[in-house]
Amino acid sequence: MFKLKINGNKFLRLTLIISVILVVILIIYTVYSIINDAKNEGKINENNEILVTEIASNEYTNFLKNCHENIDDYINMNVKITGYIYRLPTFNDNQFVLARTMILDSNNTAVVVGILSQCESASNYKDGEWVTITGTITEGYYNGTMPIVNITDIFKCDTPEEEYVYPPSTNQVI
């Protein structure tokens, strides 16, 4: 009844063009989904900039306590923190603790507290040198499971006005 004549070359070209269009649409949809998921998780703002949580001096010990106790809540969180370089002899060359001195009592009893951090340029910084780091929290291992900041940016800075930190409060969560 109907005579349908298909030219093989034209059919092949049409199939190829449709396939390319579908692949492009799939790629665009995938990229959009990834960006949208990141926005919904609070990692990217409306301008597609990565969100970074800046940890202030008065929040430092609360952050450390909560991060260690609830590590899963902090995995992949982008943070910006200021502290000084503190190393132990057992650390790798790319590791240090981003530390602060915590005053424990009115007699000025103090201890060093901090978060293990790592980057390729860690050996360029001296113990006791103040730096500000930006990085992503991951779960790592050093004498047990713990949070580690994988540093994406590090720079020297002056000692902050609030050089010392105090024990975490019992009611503040970061």
Image (cartoon, rainbow, N blue to C red):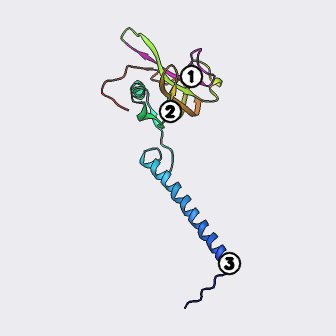
Image-based side of 160 in relation to 89, left or right: left
Rendering coords of residue 18 (x, y %): 59, 70
User: In terms of secondary structure, where does tag 2 sit?
Assistant: strand
Q: Secondary structure at mark 3?
A: helix
Mark sitting earlier along the chain (1/3): 3
Residue position marked by numbered label 1 in the rendering = 96
**What is the number of callouts on the image?**
3
Q: Amino acid at mark 3?
A: Gly
Q: Please tell me whether mark 1 sits on a helix, a strand or a loop.
A: strand
Separation of residues labelled 2 and 1 (CA atoms): 15 Å
Badge 1 local density, few (<14 within 10 Å), some, or many (20+)? Answer: many
Given the image, on which type of amino acid does mark 1 rest? Phe
Disc 2 residue type (three-letter): Thr
Residue 167, compared with residue 40, is above or below; it is above
- Magenta-colored stretch includes residue 43: no
Q: Which residue is mark 2?
A: 138
Left or right: 149, with 61 as reference point: right
Identity of the residue drawn at 64% across and 76% down:
11
Start-end of magenta stretch:
85-104
Q: Which numbered dot is residue 62? A: none
| Label 3: how many Cα within 10 Å (few below 14, some 14–19, many 20+) | few
